[in-house]
């Protein structure tokens, strides 16, 4: 028995047991840490999935804002991403939910501005108008609200009220000369008491003093008073209204007046209505004239785009006010050669 007891007191055995215990403890600790990490990752994935952008409910944003002190600007940034994606209803819901909990006047005005702007972008003009009117009740010098009120009145064809708003913005030292000029043309065009002839006369009188409205005047005259347009063709920059001339029908063209304007004559030679020019300094028209002479005029056409000189955005349709930056008379006409209808159809067969 004494020999056996001595064996268990062997120092080497004690060292082995000690390291074995350390190993077991280390293994258990390591295993537990791995388990905890996996559990944490699983919980994180659940949380991330719940709060993934695009799956959040409106109350989730407000909960984050109120409970976890998520910065106010971060909420607005998240909401703005929906605007950029075209999900206006989602961003509108977030702004409305925030308005129920915001007390600070500055923050409330900021959210109302964003709400009104989003309604405007989404085409909810009446709701947008209500929001901006609400802002103007406690902040009558708010330029952003006034500007959107002007845009809303224009879209609603209430140009007299738009003019009143323009006067208010002018009093706030905003340059409204071009805007007011555009509004004046629209007041004339939409006046139910004026005849078409009287409208045409007034617009042309304005054109003589304000060349920047020539596009608006040309569009109106080509519909309601072609005689006045052709009689004064040389007072228009035909390069800027080339698309209007290009889309005219043969019977709408006064060829006697066309012969007095070099570029206009080139346009209708390229279109195939005339055969009086051999070539053109404009590359696109020159190619079309060559094709027309070789009886291939249907194989090519002109495509038109409009680039805003202010924001540099490109638009497929001309508007006096840029749809993106809302500046007036800043869209410039550009054009390129394109396949004609017949050739385009053949290439698809």
Image (spheres, helix red, strand yellow):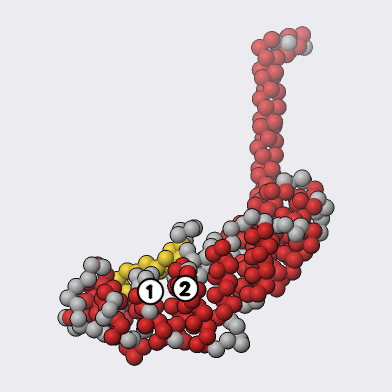
Please give left or right for residue 190 compared with residue 50 in the image.
left
Q: Position of residue 268 (x, y in %)?
A: 28, 80
For this view, does 190 lie left or right of residue 114? left
The answer to whether residue 156 is above or below residue 170 is: below
Instruction: Please name the residue shown 64% across and 55% down the image.
Output: 173
Quarter residue 191 falls in: bottom right
Q: Is residue 216 found left or right of 108 in the rendered image?
A: left
Residue identified by numbered label 1: 235
Q: CA distance from mark 2 to mark 1?
A: 9 Å
Determine the residue located farthest toward the bottom in the rendered image: 251
Where residue 58 sits: x, y (%)?
A: 73, 60
Which residue lies under the disc numbered 2?
A: 207
Is residue 168 visible in the rendered image? The answer is: yes
Q: Nearer the viewer, residue 268 or 300?
A: 268
Neighbours of disc 2 within 10 Å: few (<14), some (14-19), many (20+): many
The answer to whether residue 315 shows anywhere in this view is no
| Location of residue 256 by image quarter | bottom left
SS for dot 2:
helix
Task: Please tell me how crowded label 1 is: few (under 14), some (14-19), or many (20+) other residues with Cα within 10 Å.
Answer: few
In the image, residue 271 above or below residue 24: below
Residue positioned 77% across, 64% down in the render: 134
- If the image is split into quadrants, where does the C terminus sit? bottom left
Q: Residue at x 49, y 83 (%)?
A: 200
Residues 343 and 195: in front is 195
Q: Mark 1: which secondary structure?
A: helix
In the figure, is residue 83 to the left or right of 110? left
Q: Which mark is residue 292?
A: none
Q: Residue at x 73, y 46 (%)?
A: 70
Percent across and percent down for residue 332 are 42, 65
From the top left corner, tell me how far across and down residue 228 is, in percent: 41, 84
Q: Is the C-beta separation of discs 2 and 1 under 8 Å?
A: yes
Q: N-terminal of the two: label 2 or label 1?
A: 2
């Amino acid at each position: 028995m004494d020999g056996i007891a001595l064996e268990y007191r062997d120092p080497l055995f004690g060292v082995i047991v000690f390291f074995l215990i350390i190993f077991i403890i280390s293994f258990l600790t390591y295993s537990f840490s791995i388990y905890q990490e996996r559990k944490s990752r699983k919980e994180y994935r659940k949380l991330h999935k719940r709060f993934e952008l695009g799956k959040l409910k409106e109350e989730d944003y407000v909960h984050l804002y109120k409970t976890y002190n998520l910065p106010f600007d971060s909420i607005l940034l998240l909401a703005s991403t929906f605007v950029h994606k075209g999900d206006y209803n989602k961003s509108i819901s977030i702004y409305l939910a925030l308005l129920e909990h915001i007390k600070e006047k500055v923050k409330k005005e900021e959210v109302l501005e964003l709400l009104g702007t989003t309604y405007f972008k989404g085409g909810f003009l009446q709701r947008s108008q209500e929001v901006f009117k609400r802002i103007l009740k406690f902040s009558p010098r708010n330029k952003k609200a006034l500007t959107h009120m002007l845009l809303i009145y224009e879209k609603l064809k209430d140009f007299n009220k738009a003019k009143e708003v323009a006067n208010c913005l002018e009093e706030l030292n905003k340059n409204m000369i071009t805007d007011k000029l555009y509004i004046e043309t629209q007041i004339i065009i939409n006046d139910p008491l004026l005849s078409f002839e009287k409208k045409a006369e007034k617009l042309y009188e304005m054109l003589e003093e304000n060349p920047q409205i020539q596009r608006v005047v040309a569009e109106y005259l080509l519909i309601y008073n072609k005689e006045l347009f052709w009689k004064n063709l040389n007072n228009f920059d035909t390069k800027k209204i080339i698309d209007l001339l290009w889309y005219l029908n043969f019977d709408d063209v006064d060829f006697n007046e066309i012969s007095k304007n070099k570029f206009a004559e080139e346009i209708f030679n390229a279109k195939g209505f005339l055969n009086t020019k051999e070539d053109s300094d404009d590359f696109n028209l020159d190619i079309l004239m060559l094709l027309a002479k070789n009886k291939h005029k249907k194989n090519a056409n002109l495509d038109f785009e409009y680039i805003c000189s202010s924001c540099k955005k490109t638009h497929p349709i001309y508007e006096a006010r840029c749809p993106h930056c809302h500046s007036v008379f800043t869209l410039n006409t550009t054009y390129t050669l394109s396949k004609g209808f017949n050739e385009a159809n053949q290439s698809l067969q």
